[in-house]
Amino acid sequence: MKNLAVLVFSICLFSVAPIAAQNAKTATDYSNHIHNGVSNNQFIHDEYRANQFVPFSNSLRYNRVDGLFLGIGSDIADDDFGPIHIEGLTIKGQLGYSTNLKQWQYRAGAYKQLGNALKVGAQIINVSTTDDGWRTNQIENSVTSLISGYDYHDYYKAEGFQLVSELNLGRYIQVSGSYNATSFSSLVSNQDYSLFKGGNLARINPAIDSSTDSFYQDNFGASLTINKRPSFLRTFSTKLELKTELADIGKLKNPFSYNKYQITSTNYLKLDRSTVLKTRTMVGSITGSAPDFKQFALGGIGTMRASGYKFYTGNKMVLNNTELIFGRFNSLSMKNIETEGVHLSIFLDSGWTTNYASAGKDPFSGFDTFAFSELSHNVGAGIGFGILRFELATPIANSQGYTSLWVRLNPTF
């Protein structure tokens, strides 16, 4: 418990302390030499907006469940694309067709701004979606699925509605909440979906839980984001997000009664014009009984690059990614993909999970067994050429896995 307390305190201190400093102009202007990896999933992931606790999918995508999905409307990953503005009201929606599932999917929402700080809204959804957008964004995943047959997302069907709210306290703090009424169901994968018939075709899209393929659930979501829009022109940039899903609270009666908590700190330190140190630390805890698809899973793309895909699973999780990058970097207008610059990198991925059986609701329970010496580690190096990035990773202390070569279209985080 002491080790966890030190870790959580360090995350908060490291993230919050520099906020005031970021508002001051640094002595050297690096505006023409910014490593724009920070635009990759906007420090955490664009596909999970703070006040929406069911992630959505892009209007154009390709994967082993949908096949080719063609849609029109606004993408949740881009607030500036596709909304309809009526006096006092913003309407967002998407309609598309999944060629493999042979079904239409949709989502629609209306949002009202109340004053300068508060926004409220409601939305309905009927979509195939994933919780894996933070591992690799859907643009990259669609490309690898189509060309090589490697799909690094697991999918499920979500149908229901949400009531959402978002409170912005000044420039740096955002508090969000939602009520979610959702029916979840498993989806079957298409094992013949790639252009060149390769990749991980044999990996079946997992069921949402080993005990059932469908269930209905009510839950509440809440999040706190500190330094919601970090300045990448500064020497140090940071963002801290605390997020929770509450399905075991009050009079809610759900087939799976659980609460899920996660804290994420992502930091970028520019050592000079051509050197950037990036770190991301995530700590997660689930209390109660959660369905399989809500469990934490580490390993493979975007997490621990020399370990098997989702090899480490559990209801308690700690992950740290540290990366030192050398090169000349330019500001980019396109999110998620680096379009210019050659760079070298060295990285360390560290992770830990455990399954802790307890009927209690204390999110700190189960971390008694955590120690820094229990972390599994992967190390590696990478080189980027334009939009392509090659990463070679190998397992070291306490780690299961194998030396792996990754071909990426964007930074890991």
Image (cartoon, rainbow, N blue to C red):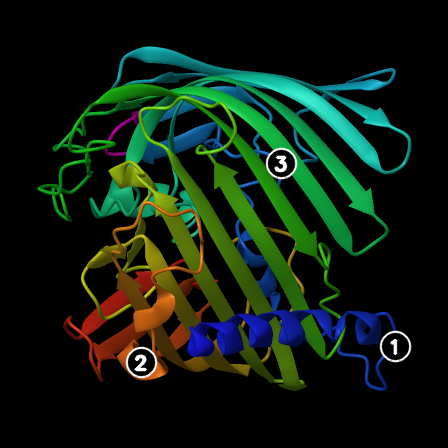
Amino acid found under the numbered disc labelled 1: Lys
Query: Mark 2 or mark 3: which comes first in sequence?
Result: 3
Which of labels 3 and 1 is toward the front? 3
Crowd class of label 3 (few under 14; some 14 to 19; many from 20; radius 10 Å): many
Q: Are marks 1 and 2 in contact (CB under 8 Å)?
A: no
Cα separation between marks 2 and 3? 35 Å
Cα separation between marks 1 and 2? 35 Å
Q: Secondary structure at mark 3?
A: loop
Report the span colored magenta. Answer: 63-67
Amino acid found under the numbered disc labelled 3: Asn
**Residue 270, how many percent across, how many down?**
65, 81
Q: Are marks 2 and 3 in contact (CB under 8 Å)?
A: no
Q: Which residue is mark 3?
A: 51
Crowd class of label 1 (few under 14; some 14 to 19; many from 20; radius 10 Å): few
Residue at 82%, 76% (x, y): give it: 21
413 over 372 or under it: above or below: above
Residue at 20%, 80% (x, y): give it: 398
Query: Mark 1 or mark 2: which comes first in sequence?
Result: 1
* Magenta run includes residue 377: no
Q: Secondary structure at mark 2?
A: strand
Q: Which residue is mark 2?
A: 380
Amino acid found under the numbered disc labelled 2: Gly
Query: Mark 3 or mark 1: which comes first in sequence?
Result: 1
Q: Secondary structure at mark 1?
A: loop
Pick the residue in front: 331 or 65: 65
Q: Which mark is residue 25?
A: 1
Crowd class of label 2 (few under 14; some 14 to 19; many from 20; radius 10 Å): many
- Seen from this angle, which residue lies furthest right? 115
